[in-house]
Image (cartoon, helix red, strand yellow):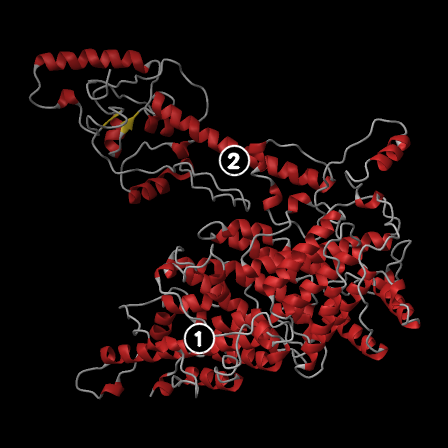
Amino acid sequence: MTMAASSHNPFPRSPNPSNRSYDSSSVSSATSPRPQVQLLGNLMGSNARSNTTQTPQPIGIPPLPPAPQSGFQPYTPVTATSVMGRDSLPPTESVASTPGLSSAQLSANVSAQKRAYRQRRKDPSCDACRERKVKCDATETTSCSECSSRNVKCQFTKETNRRMSSIKQVQDLEKQIERVRRENSNLRRTLAERGEHMDVDAEGAEQLPQQLIPDLNSEPKRRKRPTHLLPDPSRARAGFRTFSKGILKPPAPYRLPQSAIVTFEHPRPPLPPKATVDKLLHRYYGATHIMMPILHWPTLQHQVEELYQNTTDLQRVPISWHSMFFAVLAMGSLFSNDPYPDRTLRASEFLEASRSLVDPWKNDFDLEDVRASLLISLALNELNLKSAAWTWLGTAVRSAQDLDLHLEVVGVHSRVEADMRRRVWWAIYILDRTLSMELGRPFMIDDADCDVALPEPFDDHFLHTEGPVHPPNVIPLTHFLHGIVNIVRSFSAMRKAFASTVIEPPRLATFDNHFIVCQKMFPEACEANNASLIAPHMLMPLAYLLSSRLFLHRHNLAPGCPMEARSDAIQQCKVTAIDTANLIARTNATLADTATALLVTHIFRSTLFLLFTGCYDLASTCLRALKSIDVRRDVTIPCGRFLSFFLQMLSTKQRELLAAFLPRSTTPGYPPHAALPDPRAVQDALLKDEELLIYVSADMQASIETAWVWIGAEREAPLTMPPSSAGAGLAHPDTRTGLNANEREDWGGWDSLLELTKGLASGTASPAPGYAPRAQTLPPIKIEQGANIPGSGATELGSNRNSPTAGAASGNRNTERISIANII
């Protein structure tokens, strides 16, 4: 029987009375407009069920589609092609009371009422009457009086209509599945805290809580280890160790010491003077060791003293340790206070010496090999050679995994050695996460493969072979390794979130709450609302936190995101940039000798957002910080050149907008200068400019997964690149900056950027002398009527939904707009 041909309800009322309770939120038993729903809900009092708030979804687990909410939908007559057939009747008067009915029709109605009465004995009420608990007098041909008086649909869907019942069952199953998922997630988290393991199938593996942000200082989940059944497997070990040579290597803690056969020997470079070494070690400690303490400092000092007791026989020193030692000196040179270019030249010489002592064909690694590769990667990153740093980091990761540093192993004889293994691994993990996030490349380390514990929370001079020993009333930990680890462990969940076109506010809030907790691990003076001075070296670990917040919200700048999400992303990045500028303003010394490449690039990104949003005073603070760093970090000059270009484009856009707004603002009968454009309208139009959004996104355009500026570039004619000195070695500035001599000078310098920023603040910006970017020949911006971005004003700095608001209020006084007096 088809629905089109049916003359009565094809799904009669269920003959099986149901005693099960039901969820009234899934009933669509009304058809009146929504205002009537609110009125009825107020009249019904306690019988009206309010909508419950949606439970926040864990990060990495996609939310299920919500169950349909109750509501009175507009009535639509059922046609022959209706999906549900004649499952309900429109409200109407009784057929028997309709004038003009014949006696035969009345007789048919009476028999239909009797037949309907017998059916109602099995299912007595319609949906609305059952919900209100009143008597229902509906028949197959007429609506009940209750529905007629309320002007709603009279229908029977509550476990009577099979099709509606199947939909209800699907909705109930979805709710049950979601409840089981939450319970399983809580159970897995509880088991992980107890150190136990829970097996899941392949389908459930997609919802593992590894996609969640790990709790602060929580240990990774321990992986399963096999157990042996032999009472004494010593004989099996001896035989296996003897006859497995050339086939496999035992795990790192159970390998025999390397043989005395020298497989690689290279002339040892001469040692620098002892006074120079002491100075460079001091600089290394203050710039690198406080963040990545991969060396046991008392042991290193003792080894250096032994090295310089006999400088004639350097062959007695293991070549891997010698390579690591020169890499340490290279890092110390990069952060020394020597003048440019002596600092960089000496660091390049030490790096070359370290590289020359690395055996490219080595098959048996030790901890010094891993340290040397890691330090070389760190130094190359500071020299702005990020692809080279990425390659050396891969060597460090693979050699560390060859030594099982990613696993918590037993059999390490010294507690110091065990903790050094952990420190080295977590330092590699930090660089892998940070460099991958900056370059937009995949992580080389999978969290699921690692179960090594966090390092012990003690400084080197408290850590001894027998265990940590420290006097009471003394701070046991002064380095920032644990704080940085807690920050970068969230990058895996962030990368999962980046797979979505737009990151929704609940997920953003989860990350921001995690960053707030991470910030509390730093000294109280680092809080954004604190006015006390801080040391410059405190900004280096804080750069990990600040850049992570900016990376998170900057993702929603992509064109695929809704306009509201893009506007909110601009404001959240602005808040992070304001916090950065305020921290820089509170430093008690220059950043010249302590700034890392990560801090420089973060200040560069913050400056872009401050200029873009009109915070010119704070942008000048960042520019002065970059000026103090200048050539000490090779990435600073390219950042300054890009900022000069951005300022030129911003100034051009501002002038075009002023010229476009002024004619429309002129009042007839008055001079043209009497009516002035609204500065807020000009700023809002700038915030909606798609070309400026590309520029402010900066290194988002470096990854093919996040870039949109290169779309269609394959159809353009190939550009002719000017000759460069690429491959000229570490000592050549062209290699480190990516710019030739002319390009390093054509942007005008930091003073010109400060003048341009000052001109933007007054609305009279002019191009820097001698620098005319090619982009000025582009066609003028197209002005749209009523350009407005919600939340772009300074008054909304304190109303952020997803970012910490500390320090936002202090940015109001620094947020300068184009004043009317300046425009005049």
Q: In this view, does 319 lie above or below 536?
A: above
Query: What residue sits right under mark 1 in the picture?
Result: 646
Q: In this view, does 212 lie above or below 513?
A: above
Nearest the camera: 518 or 388? 388
Nearest the camera: 344 or 631? 344
- In which image quadrant can residue 333 be found? bottom right
- Using a 10 Å C-alpha cutoff, classify the residue at mark 1 as few (fewer than 14 neighbours), some (14 to 19) or many (20 or more): many
Q: Which residue is drawn at 38% across and 56% down?
A: 562
Q: Earlier in the sequence, mark 2 or mark 1?
A: 2
Residue 416 location, x and y as percent? 85, 55
Per the image, label 1 sits on a secondary structure element best described as: helix
- In which image quadrant can residue 585 be found? bottom right
Q: Nearer the viewer, mark 2 or mark 1?
A: 1
Q: Which residue is drawn at 17% across and 15% down?
A: 109
Q: What residue type is labelled 2?
A: Glu
Residue 283 lies left or right of residue 763; in this view the side is right
Label drawn at residue 576? none
Query: What residue sits right under mark 2 in the picture?
Result: 178
Q: Quadrant of the N terminus?
A: top left
Residue 9 location, x and y as percent? 25, 19
Q: Is residue 331 above or below residue 189?
A: below
Per the image, label 2 sits on a secondary structure element best described as: helix
Q: What residue type is labelled 1?
A: Phe
The reply to whether residue 803 is visible in this rendering is no
Residue 173 lies left or right of residue 315; in this view the side is left
Residue 313 location, x and y as percent? 90, 68
Q: Residue furthest right?
A: 309
Q: In which quarter of the image is the C terminus?
A: bottom left
